[in-house]
Image (tube, rainbow, N blue to C red):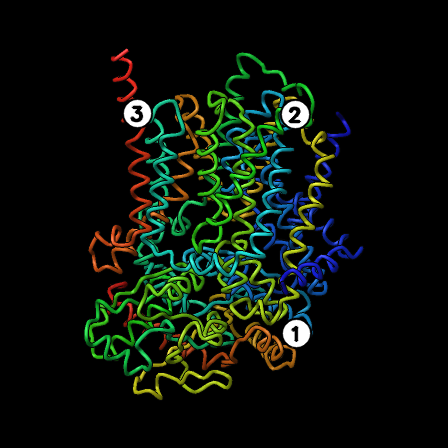
Amino acid sequence: MRKLLKFCLVATIAVTGAYSLVHAQSLEVTITAPAGAGGGWDSASRSLQEVMMATGAAKSVQVVNVPGAGGTVGLAQFVGAAKGSPKQLLVAGITLVGASISNASPVDLTQVTPVARLTGDPLVIVVPKDSPIKTMADLKATIAKDVAKTIWVGGSAGGADHILAALVTKGSGQDPAKVNYVAYSGGGESLAAMLGGQATAGVSGYGEWEGQIKSGDLRALAISYPEPIAGIEAQPLKAQGFDIELVNWRGVFAGPGVEGKDLDAIKAAVEKTVKSDRWKEVLKTRGWTDYYAPSDEFKTFIGSETERVRAILTSIGLAN
Amino acid sequence: MDSLFYLFQGFATAIEPANLIYAAVGVIIGTAVGVLPGIGPALTVALLLPVTFKLDPGGSIIMFAGIYYGGMYGGSTTAILLNTPGESASVVTALEGNKMARSGRGGPALATAAIGSFVAALIATIGLAFLAPMLVKVAVKFGPWDYFGLMLIAFVTVSATFGSSPLRGLTSLAFGLWLGLMGIDQLTGQARLTFGVPELLDGVEVTTLAVGLFAIGEALIVASRHLYKPEKPIPVKGSIWMSKDDWKRSWKPWLRGTVIGFPIGALPAGGAEIPTFLSYNVERKLSDKPEEFGHGAIEGVAGPEAANNASAAGTLVPLLTLGLPTSATAAVMLAGFQQYNIQPGPLLFTQHADLVWGLVASLFIANVMLLVLNLPLVGLWVRLLKIPLPWLYAGILVFASMGTIAANPSVVELLLLTGFGVIGFFMRKFDYPIAPAVVGLILGPLADSALRRSMQMSLGDPMILFQHWSSAIMIGIAVIALVAPFLFRGLSRFQQDED
């Protein structure tokens, strides 16, 4: 009996020990991924962690996941905890811009300090393989004929996918407030709806549906990137008569009020990381497109992107 | 027959001594972490995925399979022994399993769960090998209207099954449905019933509710009774192994659980919860001793556990054939694949056949390993119940809160857990069944979005639910299941009158 208790005790200590190791406080830098393990921001954070340590840009890097509400829970926590701290970073992207606006969150990305924009992935517009729609012009005609009957599927409401569907509807001369967008929790479920032929068109990150596009199960009409991308057959919307560009970017931020020497040190470490060969390798393995922009440029970008997303979300009725 | 060849090749890789060690280590770590309530297999795998990155692809996937099955088994162990389901899929296991454990039959309960999982995984693996390409064609045709029909069946059977009166069952279900409405609405992105608390924006976590209602509520009840009349630890009665009768009562539920679990698991939004609930209901209806249900019927453990494992194998169908991650665990698996620059999808079977069948073989090996390592430990686990009750329940409280915080480190989560614990206490006190509340929370949001997606696609015409024969049939079954008991009761009364 006593032995058993001892065993339980040891097991408990072992488990808690292992757990606190995973969540130990940072020695050098802690990266907050405002999403659960396995998602895009999480993998970006973990790749950054790996390369920062491999290149010696940082001595030790920890990743902490704070999931919730499209990242706004993590952002709120970060704004409070990382104020003026030279040891805290946050990885976030365009979805967080949209989520802050549509959740009417008291915090948004203009309150933290942009360090660098890292990656930017194209979104893709697809139709089922046996759809009569073959080109963007066909899709435009379909939308113009009956905007409500054009059923779009994609990721969460108010996210980048939804925004692109609204932009294309607007670009086809229709009221974006009328877009019939059926939101799914992720690329997987909306893919099933596409393959099952339940929707007219679908939007997702190109990488998520690449396999189905290459195997011919889905027909890609266009990508949302401003220029053509090597290895992707679908052409940009801009080349097909739509003045639309939308990039699913991810970047890294420091806390509010981080400046001077502290900020310079972080900038230098991140720059060293993203200029390394190891980082280029990571981009290739993960299928990410390089979209690097240094701190100042990124700051301007955040401002304009926030305004743009707010305008679109207001036009589809998801923000006031 | 290429697939058979690759499958054998996969086995050849998986039984290399080094790989067997990886599998054993994975199973042990997985079980250790999986016994924490609130940490299900998906989270276990996500937490431990970095450990596997250091290995070669083969070894990594094998260890990964071990962690996965270990985590799943750990969840059922605590559900049976401590009435603390580690994840939503083992909620049903707790219903009968814990009653068995409390009447001294924890050993057979654990054994039927382990062997049932093994049998189900074995059959489902064979199903995966031969039916995957066919099954997946049906699965993607499943529209939102079909999901709505499936949810209706689940609601009707669940509310009719649990509790001393249908009204109590429905009240509990309504509580769960209300909790399910909380958070950001998936279709419009607007917040519902969050009362300005940002942590509620993602809704109520199923495990928080389940652990709060089951484990904390249970601990409070035991404590309140203990004040007046100290309870003795539960003695282990009879053999800790399954008797001949146990085997006889278990094998059919194993098979039926598999048949229910595998196809529903293969549906892109099927999940593991619906099959476990359905299997429980089927076993209750078919049992020779329906009066034992609610007091520790072994069929009620054997069926749902098999269904749970079979559905886990089922989720591999869309993952491997379409690249569709349909469950949290499948999504983590996808991350594991991507680590090696392998994109699951329609081309995976042709481009990386060796790896796919290697994975299938290692899932199988992990299952065998689990059985080999854990059956001898059943005796040890069961002795856990001999711990004096104050110790045992204090331990449960610690484990429950630790597991919940580990899954989501937040004060709000802990407050919710405590609040649900108190609610669980009163529900028990006033004899309200707990399971329907959990079912409501799991299936409510799914049914909500399925119905609204259907309506969105039909531009608001409700007839879309009946225009598709599949959903029309399922809604018909739900209606019959709802009305039939009343009809039969009326009919038998009529016959009695004639006598």
Position of residue B176 in the picture relative to residue B83 (left or right): left
Q: Identify the residue under disc 2.
A: B244
Q: Identify the residue under disc 3.
A: B488
> Dividing the picture into quarters, in which one does residue B61 lie?
bottom right
**Image position of A152 with respect to A280: above or below:** above
Do circles 3 and 1 both sit on a common chain?
Answer: no
Q: Identify the residue under disc 1.
A: A57
**Image position of A309 with respect to B329: above or below:** below
For marks 2 and 1, give the CA distance. 64 Å
For marks 3 and 1, give the CA distance. 74 Å
> Dividing the picture into quarters, in which one does residue B19 lie?
bottom right
Chain under disc 3: B
- The residue nearer to you, when weighing B134 against B151, is B134
In percent of width and height, residue A287 lies at: 54, 75
The N terminus of chain B sits in image quarter? bottom right
For marks 3 and 2, give the CA distance. 35 Å
Chain under disc 1: A
Name the residue: 58% across, 14% down: B230
Provide the secondary structure element on which disc 2 rests.
helix
* Residue depth check, mark 2 versus mark 1: number of the one nearer the observer: 2
Provide the secondary structure element on which disc 1 rests.
loop
Name the residue: 62% across, 61% down: A62
Residue B401 seen by the camera: no
Do circles 2 and 1 both sit on a common chain?
Answer: no
Chain under disc 2: B
